[in-house]
Image: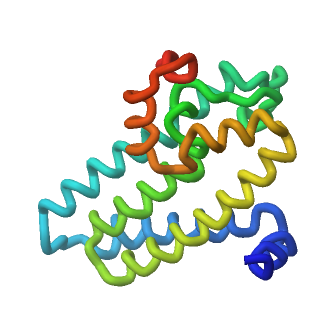
Amino acid sequence: MKGWKRVLNGLPPHLLAWIWAALLFLQMGLAFFVFTEPRYPGLMFAGWATWALGTVFAIVPIFALRRRGGVPQGKSYMETTSLVDTGIYAIVRHPQSGTAGILLNLALALIGQHWLLVALAVVGIALLYVDLIRADEVCVNKFGPSYLGYMERVPRVNFVAGILRLLRHPGPEGTDSD
């Protein structure tokens, strides 16, 4: 494990994100423009439903971070100064880059139903997850002990576990509708 951490720490900060994003765009091109005849319409329907859910996880964080993240005027929503742990961030720690990315990769494999799309999804999801481990380390450095507590309460990307946790233990972080 320590060998992997050394390799990860030696990489440029956003390299993994660029690679998995490029793979996602490649999947999109293949799924929508190359592989047009799905074998199983039910899987394609499941893919579109997964795509819709992934889109929610991709868009909602923009508004949540702008609203609650202490973003300075004129700056990107990603330049938060406050830890956001309400709304969608009470369900998963990484809704946009993590949960949405995984769901969109999976959706494209289901929509296109081709072995190449499945292979790209597997590689993309693996790179994305490794990138999220690194993102947690960055957030611990930025927000300190409060982020460590947040990590204990909220799953990294598992939105089903996050929703079940909120249903079992509703609290202040589960009361916002972002």
Residue drawn 74% across and 42% down?
148
Q: Is residue 62 left or right of residue 56?
A: right
| 76 lies above or below 39 | above
Q: Which quadrant of the view contains residue 20?
A: bottom right
Front-lying residue, 37 or 72: 72
Q: Residue at x 78, y 25 (%)?
A: 71
Which percent across, then down, holds residue 93? 60, 42
Number of numbered discs visible in the structure rendering: 0
Q: Is residue 170 left or right of residue 22?
A: left
**Image check: 78 left or right of 24?**
right
Up/down of 103 relative to 161, above or below: below
**Render colour scheme:** rainbow
| Residue at 84 percent of width and 76 percent of height | 6
Q: Position of residue 65 (x, y in %)?
A: 66, 28
Image spot of residue 172 (x, y percent): 56, 17
Q: Quadrant of the N terminus?
A: bottom right
In the figure, 101 relative to 31: above or below? above
Place residue 7 in its image quadrant.
bottom right
**55 up-or-down from 74: above or below:** below
The answer to whether residue 163 is left or right of residue 68 is left
